[in-house]
Image (spheres, rainbow, N blue to C red):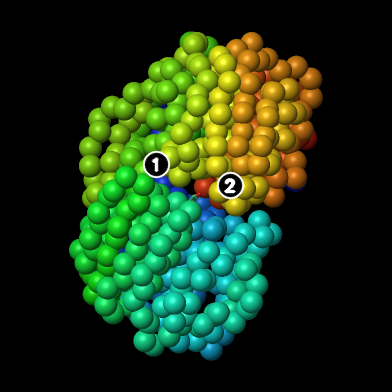
Amino acid sequence: MHNTILIKSKINSYNKIIEVSSDKSLSIRSVLLASQAVGKSTLKNLLYSEDVEASLKTIRSLGINFKKKKNYIEIYGNGLNGFKLKKKNIINACNSGTLARLILGVLVKAEEKIELIGDKSLSRRDFSRVTEPLKLFGVNFKSKNKTLPIKFYGTDFPRPITYLEKRGSAQCKSAVMLAALNTPGKTKIKAKKSRDHTENFFKFLNVPIKVKKKNQYDYIEINGQKNYKGFKYTIPGDISSAAFFIVLTLLTENSKLLIKNVNINDSRIGIIKILKKMNANIKFKNKHIYNGEKIGDILIKYTKNLKGINCSNSLNSSAIDEFPVIFLIAAKAKGISTFTKLNELNKKESPRLDITTKYLRMMGVKIKRHNDDLKIYGNRKLELKGNFRVNNFLKDHRIFMMSCIAALSYGGYWKIEDKDSIKTSFPKFLNIVKSLGAKIKWEEGKT
Ligand code: S3P
């Protein structure tokens, strides 16, 4: 009911200040790390979205208590491997790949059987990418499937490993790091560059970790099984959520937007680097470091003369969640844009490379796809008329929000299904869209 929205007109120009929802990666990591700390941790500005609620339910099912207060949450950790397991345990990660992959690392020493399950979208995603390295620590996986449901139990005597992470996946790297945290001795990781929030968090908690950053790979060493104390942490805004409004502002004539208090960690700002190369008028303000993370405000102004980009795939990992909206800019930029080696994009909540290609073509954008490479032929005059329907996208939150941005910046009469998908990462997305002046209706005609 009321889960389909209608957008019938482009948004008018605006000049506003907003704050987006808190960072999902940092919210999930802070919950999982607080659950293993000794004593109370206080998390402020935690993202209350379905992925994070699933993380909280998970730690509660493992015997960890927490109390939600008005502006913060207190989590009472029992130290490393301080979980109280039942004879049979089920963890439902719902839609969250990050929770599902990271919790497998956290539970390297689980002494009882656990079944990990998820929703339809999560149940089609590959888990062998984390079960393979975790087997080397000594975790016993009972199912042969590469997908959920997965049954497993841990080991009393995990062994440190040497691991090469070649995909540029922070989830794989972090699952191994969290297993290393619970394993005596030195785990060595060589990881293709990806978001480094887990590394920063470990440093902040004084977990013994060494990180050497080189050109394409980072070299990480962790000395495990050292307890750390409860901590205080405030979660900043999510650049992956800000991305939708960055793109909307660049495409909406005479508009200006200031997005306050966003995580602008170098390993997350691929979108900014890409858009700046396309001439986008974007500036960071009030930059500062908070517990190892870079935070700042983002000022965006409508940009008339956007141009195409030959995008280096070295930026893929730092922009991975933002490509659907980056493609919207490429579609309206002058000239051809090329993006290569986008294979990881098809491994997300939905096969995003296939789905975005399909919807861009539906919008009349000329695209050539060769395997995992994309050529988008920009058209500065792109304006849409007629009817567009977006459905069957595995309730992927980012596809829903990308479609809204397309409707609001290109025009046309849009019916977009599965509005509730935004609860995964950005529950206040539509409220912000409306606060900028957009007119949105539910299918039944309710506004
Ligand atoms: C995430 C890492 C990325 C990203 C996901 C969140 C994380 O996935 O797509 O939304 O918090 O570590 P991969 O690490 O698999 O690329």
**x and y, in percent, of residue 418 in the image:** 69, 44
Residue under pointer 1: 268
Image position of 212 (left or right of 414):
left
Q: Is residue 84 visible?
A: no
Q: Could you tell me how far apart the alpha carbons at marks 1 and 2 are, in whole angstroms? A: 18 Å
Label 2: which secondary element: helix
Residue at x-position 71% and y-position 33%: 359
**x and y, in percent, of residue 82 in the image:** 35, 80
Q: In which quarter of the image is the C terminus?
A: top right
Q: In this view, does 270 lie above or below 88?
A: above
Residue at x-position 23% and y-position 42%: 289
Residue under pointer 2: 343
For marks 1 and 2 on the same chain, the one whose residue lies earlier in the sequence: 1
Q: Is residue 364 visible?
A: yes
Amino acid type at circle 2 is Asn
Image position of 164 (left or right of 117):
left
**x and y, in percent, of residue 248 in the image:** 53, 24
Instruction: Indicate if the residue with disc 1 has its beta carbon within 8 Å of ligand 1.
Output: no
Residue at x-position 25% and y-position 30%: 286
Q: How crowded is mark 2: few (under 14 residues within 10 Å), some or many (20 or more)?
A: some
Amino acid type at circle 1 is Arg
Q: In this view, does 69 lie above or below 276?
A: below
